[in-house]
Image (tube, helix red, strand yellow):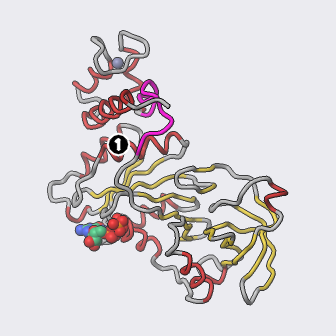
């Protein structure tokens, strides 16, 4: 039968299969004997597989075939991700837009569409949420504001996730765990031997695990981050990750304009006229300088 690898620990793969979508009953502890030889690749969390049940009562099985992957993410290592949800708080803590831009670049490098979610709208006393959303909508990203505490925007968020596998990320303290809990609500996970087995592995390494939140809908909860390096990127490529710059580049005097110190620059003009967000442009300049001074190996 078909299933999906939701977690891998020490040579075991936990495969979500069968009809019991919202219950731990549908999770089989599998080995992947013979798959490496046959498919020449290592199973990844997120892989769709064919499996056979060895022992239904003990929920043990064997993965017999890896089905084709439509995407493969390196950070975090997971297959078949459709999109990323990046969570920031509107306040407490204030969003670090430089960090957000770094995250967006990393996902664009891997061709993964990004939804930006601003949480804690219940304490948005200064009314920042529209401003924040418009910065990123102007750049072509989808945005959503929610409150995990007041359970606002959760249904809309679920709509954006439905039928897809989404990697969920955000710096610490933004309410990611609270939001993941909201998304899981209504799902009865039965306690039992399988979840205990999964539990045991938790203390050794940080594994990524897919959580089923609705039929054909999974989220990957990733550890909070406080910094992100830029990898595999030359400074000349950076502007390509700021999609809102593109329509103005034709007004730059020089081809390959860096939009920093050149005299006639369509991008700088657009910033001055408020057509490109100053926050985005300033972070572009900071990241450009960083790439410029990066050591080449
Ligand atoms: N006002 C408000 N506070 C929230 C909301 N969501 C979460 N919080 C609070 O923000 C703090 C951090 O929430 P968590 O869910 O632990 O955040 P996290 O992003 O998982 O943080 P880490 O565990 O550090 O990665 C807690 O005190 C939550 O009660 C919200 O929608 N509104
Ligand atoms: Zn320019």
Q: Going by the image, does 125 lie left or right of 41?
A: left
Query: Residue 159 in the image: x percent, y percent?
Result: 48, 61
The residue positioned 67% from the left and 49% from the top of the image is: 70
Q: Is residue 152 visible?
A: no
Mark 1 near ligand 1 (CB under 8 Å)?
no
Q: Does 119 lie within the magenta span?
A: no
Range of the magenta residues? 229-241
The residue positioned 74% from the left and 64% from the top of the image is: 49
Quadrant that contains the N terminus: bottom right
Task: Name the one closer to the observer, 95 or 133.
Answer: 95
Task: Name the one closer to the observer, 21 or 258.
Answer: 258
Badge 1 is on which residue?
136
- The quarter of the picture where residue 23 lies is bottom right
Task: Name the one closer to the observer, 194 or 189.
Answer: 194
Position of residue 241 relative to residue 246, above or below, is below
Query: Residue 233 in the image: x percent, y percent?
Result: 48, 33
Query: Residue 292 in the image: x percent, y percent?
Result: 37, 27
Q: Is residue 162 visible?
A: yes
Quadrant of picture, ligand 1: bottom left
- The quarter of the picture where residue 27 lies is bottom right
The residue positioned 36% from the left and 9% from the top of the image is: 253
Q: Going by the image, does 30 lie left or right of 163?
A: right
Position of residue 245 relative to residue 103, above or below, is above
- The quarter of the picture where residue 288 lies is top left
Count every numbered label the image shows and give the total.
1
Query: Residue 196 in the image: x percent, y percent?
Result: 57, 85
């Amino acid at each position: 039968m078909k299933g999906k690898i939701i977690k891998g620990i020490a040579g075991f793969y936990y495969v979500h299969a069968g009809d019991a979508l919202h219950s731990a009953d549908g999770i089989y502890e599998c080995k992947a004997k013979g798959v490496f030889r046959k498919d020449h690749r290592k199973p990844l969390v997120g892989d769709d597989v064919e499996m056979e049940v060895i022992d239904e009562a003990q929920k043990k099985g064997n993965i017999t075939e890896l089905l084709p992957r439509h995407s493969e993410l390196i950070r975090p290592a997971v297959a078949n991700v459709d999109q990323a949800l990046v969570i920031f708080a509107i306040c407490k803590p204030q969003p670090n837009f430089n960090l957000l831009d770094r995250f967006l670049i990393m996902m664009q490098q891997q061709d993964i569409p990004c939804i930006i979610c601003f949480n804690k709208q219940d304490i948005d006393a200064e009314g920042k949420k529209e401003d924040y959303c418009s910065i990123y909508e102007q750049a072509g990203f989808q945005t959503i504001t929610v409150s995990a505490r007041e359970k606002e925007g959760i249904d809309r968020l679920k709509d954006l996730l439905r039928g897809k596998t989404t990697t969920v990320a955000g710096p610490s303290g933004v309410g990611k765990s609270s939001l993941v809990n909201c998304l899981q609500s209504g799902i009865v996970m039965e306690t039992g031997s399988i979840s205990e087995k999964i539990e045991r592995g938790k203390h050794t390494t940080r594994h990524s695990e897919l959580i089923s939140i609705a039929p054909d809908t999974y989220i990957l909860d990733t550890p909070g981050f406080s910094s992100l390096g830029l990898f595999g990127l030359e400074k000349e490529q950076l502007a390509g990750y700021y999609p809102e710059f593109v329509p103005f580049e034709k007004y730059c005097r020089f081809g390959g304009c860096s939009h920093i110190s050149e005299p006639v620059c369509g991008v700088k003009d657009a910033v001055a006229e408020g057509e490109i967000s100053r926050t985005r442009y300033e972070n572009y300049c900071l990241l450009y300088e960083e790439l410029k001074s990066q050591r080449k190996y």
